[in-house]
Image (cartoon, rainbow, N blue to C red):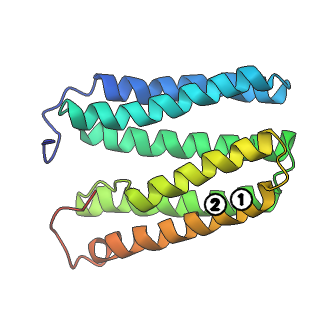
Amino acid sequence: MARERGDSVNPVNLPNILSLLRLAILPFFLSYLAGGDIKAALYAMGGMIVTDVLDGYTARRFNLVSRLGKILDHVVDKIVLLTVSYTMCRVRDLPFWVFYLILLREVATLSVSAFLWKKRNVVAQSNVVGRVAGVFSVVTALAYIFEHPYRVPLLYLTLLAMFLSSLNYLRIYLPHILNRRKDRVPV
């Protein structure tokens, strides 16, 4: 069972190092993709996906859940999503309006997360609906990398999944925002 607050966990731990590694891999992915080296870009993307999966798994499995880790993972995920989306607009045919829509969503989510952390001492966490939206994002990114004919329908499914994730996030955290709930937040 993970520690409830995570304050006693050393912040220099494997899950947090994996989150930072994901961030370190990002420029390589972007460079390979922009340079047209699809094979190398896919390896880099695979590395980012593996580190994303492993950071959460190792944190829970080895009881290394920390406040810093929850925040770091959240922020790194957003940096990766926004940077990859922008790059896909520049080097693939992802419409720029999609980037701006994702940017709006991520700024809103980070703003709510910062408010919850500062004012309510609650660290917003990902959940199953958010993870499903993340999987859709990866599949759609791959479809755009390979210029798959179904990339546009996949894009709309991804945007729907992101919208549902945002609604779920609001459902979970609105009581905390309104200060009507002080118990723990479900994962």
Tell me whether circle 2 and circle 1 mark residues in contact (CB < 8 Å).
Answer: yes
Q: Is residue 51 left or right of residue 34?
A: left
Which residue position holds label 2? 158
Residue type indicated by callout 2: Thr
Residue type indicated by callout 1: Leu
For label 2, the SS is: helix
Question: Residue at 23% across / 57% down in the picture?
Answer: 121
Q: Work out which quarter of the rendered image holds the N terminus and state it.
A: top left
User: Where is 128 relative to 176, above or below?
Assistant: above
Q: Is residue 110 visible?
A: no
User: Where is 166 relative to 67, above or below?
Assistant: below
Which residue position holds label 1? 154
Q: Is residue 175 visible?
A: yes
Q: Looking at this view, name the residue that lies furthest to the front.
A: 149
- Picture quadrant of residue 141: top right
Give the label on residue 1, or none.
none
